[in-house]
Amino acid sequence: MDYILIDLDGTITNPKEGITKSVQYALSAMNIHIDDLDSLTKHIGPPLRDGFMEFYGFNEEEAEMAVKKYREYYGERGIHENELYDGMETLLTKLKQAGKYLIVATSKPEELAVKVLKSFHLEHYFDDICGATFDDSRASKDAVIKYALEKNSITNMDRVVMIGDRKYDVLGAKEFGIFSIGVLYGFGSEEELKQAGADRIAASVEEVYDIVIEL
């Protein structure tokens, strides 16, 4: 595998505090008050608008308002409430040393993804950073993957692997016949990843490297 597409939230960094507090802030603005931040981790992975509509029955206008409030908190505070997974920089270093072409493929707006990676001084490891758009014209993981492939002129899917922690990463990869690795240290369960059809499961950051090198 020469091209490595890798998810950001829940795969490279642990954004739990920032994302859940941002969702909590947005929901509060919509008169939905939730104290248990753990219950909001389901929003880590899917496009924000889709999550608000699915979990709270918001219509499109309400979902748009909630997304706006989310970004109000996230842009100022939530983006900094984030942690790098242990061993991640070592993994990225080893993948680059092995000659891999690394691309971030995230449903987070691209501009914010760049800011997160720069905050951890990781942007130089990546050959490209591909994310969603603020207007949601590109929001789903399969749309982001399509964008990443086309932007980088990748046509041989047998040379590509997608790494992520949620079913959206796996299902997005399947749309293009891409091999997928699901990681268990993020926010998706083993059951979720297996049901989505992940080709391999990595229990740790270190195991991700071992699987990639085997392929």
Image (cartoon, helix red, strand yellow):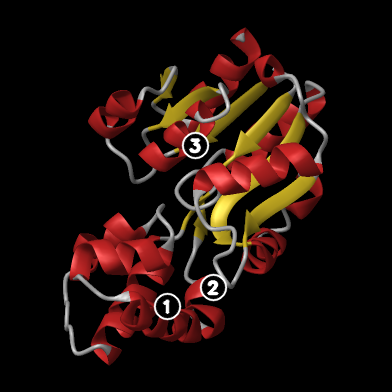
The CA distance from mark 1 to mark 2 is 18 Å
Q: Position of residue 6 (x, y in %)?
A: 60, 39
CB contact under 8 Å: marks 1 and 2: no
Q: Position of residue 152 (x, y in %)?
A: 81, 39
Mark 3 to mark 1 CA distance (whole Å): 22 Å
117 left or right of 141 in image: right
Q: Nearer the viewer, residue 210 or 134?
A: 134
Tell me: 114 left or right of 179: right
Looking at the rendered structure, the kind of residue marked 1 is: Val
Q: CA distance from mark 2 to mark 3?
A: 28 Å
Quadrant in the rendering for residue 204: top left
Mark 3: give few (<14), some (14-19) or many (20+) Cα within 10 Å. Answer: many
Left or right of residue 84, residue 117 in this image? right
Label 1 crowding class (10 Å Cα cut-off): few <14, some 14-19, many 20+? many
What secondary structure is found at the residue carrying circle 3? helix
Q: Is residue 7 visible?
A: no
Q: Which residue is mark 3?
A: 172
Question: What amino acid type is highlighted by mark number 3?
Answer: Gly
Can you see residue 140?
Answer: yes
Res. 203 image quadrant: top left
Q: Which residue is mark 2?
A: 80
Badge 1 or badge 2: first in the primary sequence: 1
Q: Nearer the viewer, mark 1 or mark 2?
A: 1
Residue type beneath disc 2: His
Identify the secondary structure beneath mark 2: helix
Residue indicated by mark 1: 67
Quarter of the image that includes the N terminus? top right
